[in-house]
Image (cartoon, rainbow, N blue to C red):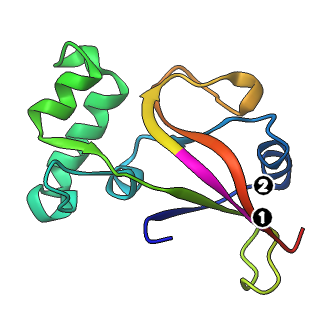
Amino acid sequence: MKNKLTLILIQQWFIDTLKGIKPEEYRAITPYWAKRLLCMENGDNLSKCYSEGTINFICRSLKWYNLNFKSIEDVLTTYHIRFKDFEATDFRNGYKSLKEVPRFIIENKGITIGKGNPDWGYVGDENVFIIHHGRVLEQFNI
């Protein structure tokens, strides 16, 4: 699988995701996650086209789009960015070697931005990246 996102989960969310109880994962809208989950319309990395200051501004605008933009889509269009296309997400429970760490690979059904479900770990009132899950494809060390 050529285009796979790797994420580390604590045990509770790892188990709930594996069982299908938690159908989405959340990540804060920060420059770190923006660079991992977003790219330019042509596929280039954000860092290739924008300074750290601009990436910070893009993140603030995505969290609270009503500051300077009408919608999240308006932010993405203005800066010519899109969500990266991941075929799957590789979830790991910890940082052990691949031979030892409990992990599974799940279909990645896309990424959006919005508010999450508090029952699935969302905390706060800011928008977050929402990574949507499909079916489990493979399991290791479980």
Circle 1 residues within 10 Å: few <14, some 14–19, many ≥20: some
Q: What's drawn in magenta, residue-wise?
A: 103-108
Residue depicted at x 58% and y 57%? 89
* Whole-percent x, y for residue 31 in the image: 34, 51
Residue type highlighted by circle 2:
Ile
Residue depicted at x 43% and y 65%? 3
Label 1: state its secondary structure.
Answer: loop
Alpha carbon separation for disc pair 1 and 2: 6 Å
Q: Residue furthest right?
A: 142
| Majority secondary structure of magenta residues | strand
* Residue occupied by mark 2: 10
Q: Nearer the viewer, residue 82 or 56?
A: 82
Asked if the magenta segment contains residue 77, the reply would be no
Q: Earlier in the sequence, mark 1 or mark 2?
A: 2
Question: Which numbered dot is residue 80?
Answer: none
* Whole-percent x, y for residue 101 in the image: 79, 76
Report the side of 1 relative to 18 (left or right): left
Residue type highlighted by circle 1:
Asn
* Whole-percent x, y for residue 127 in the image: 45, 26
Report the side of 137 relative to 32 (left or right): right
Residue depicted at x 80% and y 49%? 18
Q: Are marks 1 and 2 in contact (CB under 8 Å)?
A: yes
* Residue occupied by mark 1: 93
Quadrant housing residue 96: bottom right
Q: Locate the C terminus by quadrant.
A: bottom right
Label 2: state its secondary structure.
Answer: loop
Asked if the magenta segment contains residue 107, the reply would be yes
Residue depicted at x 71% and y 23%? 118
Report the side of 84 relative to 58 (left or right): right
Q: Nearer the viewer, residue 22 or 118?
A: 22
Q: How many labels, in total? A: 2
Circle 2 residues within 10 Å: few <14, some 14–19, many ≥20: few
